[in-house]
Image: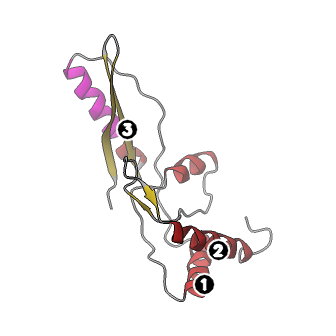
Amino acid sequence: MVETSTNLASVKTKETIVVGTSQRSSVESSLQDVVQMVQATFKLACASYESSEGYPGWQPNLDSEILRIATNSYLRLFNQKPDVRAIHAGLECGLIGKKYPGMDMISFGPTVKGAHSPDERLNIKTTQHFWDFTLDILKNIPNGKY
């Protein structure tokens, strides 16, 4: 799994050239390291820079109760074990986790191809699976647990 990344998000020309980058990581300290590296690179080029808060890191809990509920739901609905893995995504979990520390959460969704590109598309068939899966997870959370 990619832990930390940086990308060239945009280049705009106005009176000056404005370069936007985006950094993310599942490890908060690594995120700060890469932000400082990008800032240092701009300083070496005698360019000014601004930083925004961005997305906080999120370390998935592969031993969580909600993951067990979701795994059992998937197996029951689709008669196969889900492909449970950590990927370099789930930025919303970082934002939610920062606001609600210790919250038990997972990230899942329909199949997306070509994410963040002009070729981005959604596999329509998987949206019904996603919906059915979401409803089944919610039905199987013990009352008052979440």
The number of numbered discs placed on residues in the rendered structure image is 3
Tag 3, which secondary structure? Answer: strand
CA gap between label 1 and label 2 equals 8 Å
Q: What x and y, as percent, mark residue 6?
A: 31, 42
Instruction: Name the dominant secondary structure of the magenta segment.
Output: helix
Tag 2, which secondary structure? Answer: helix
Work out which residue is located at the far left of the displayed protein and give it: 44
Q: Amino acid at mark 1?
A: Leu
**Which residue lies under the disc numbered 3?**
22
Q: Is residue 73 above or below residue 13?
A: below
What residue appears at the point 60 percent right and 57 percent down from the top-left corner? 102
Q: Amino acid at mark 2?
A: Asp
Q: Is residue 47 above or below residue 89?
A: above
What residue appears at the point 42 percent right and 46 percent down from the top-left corner? 28
User: Which of the two discs, 3 and 2, labels the residue nearer the N terminus?
Assistant: 3
User: What span is colored magenta in the figure?
Assistant: 32-45
Horizontal side of residue 135 vs 90, given as left or right: right
User: Is residue 126 inside the magenta stretch?
Assistant: no
Mark number for residue 132? 2
Are the residues at dot 1 and dot 2 in contact (C-beta closer than 8 Å)?
yes
**Which residue lies under the disc numbered 1?**
77
Classify 10 Å Cα crowding around label 2: few (below 14), some (14-19), many (20 and above). Answer: some
Label 3 vs label 2, nearer the camera: 2
Work out which residue is located at the far right of the displayed protein and give it: 143
Specify the quadrant that holds the N terminus: bottom left
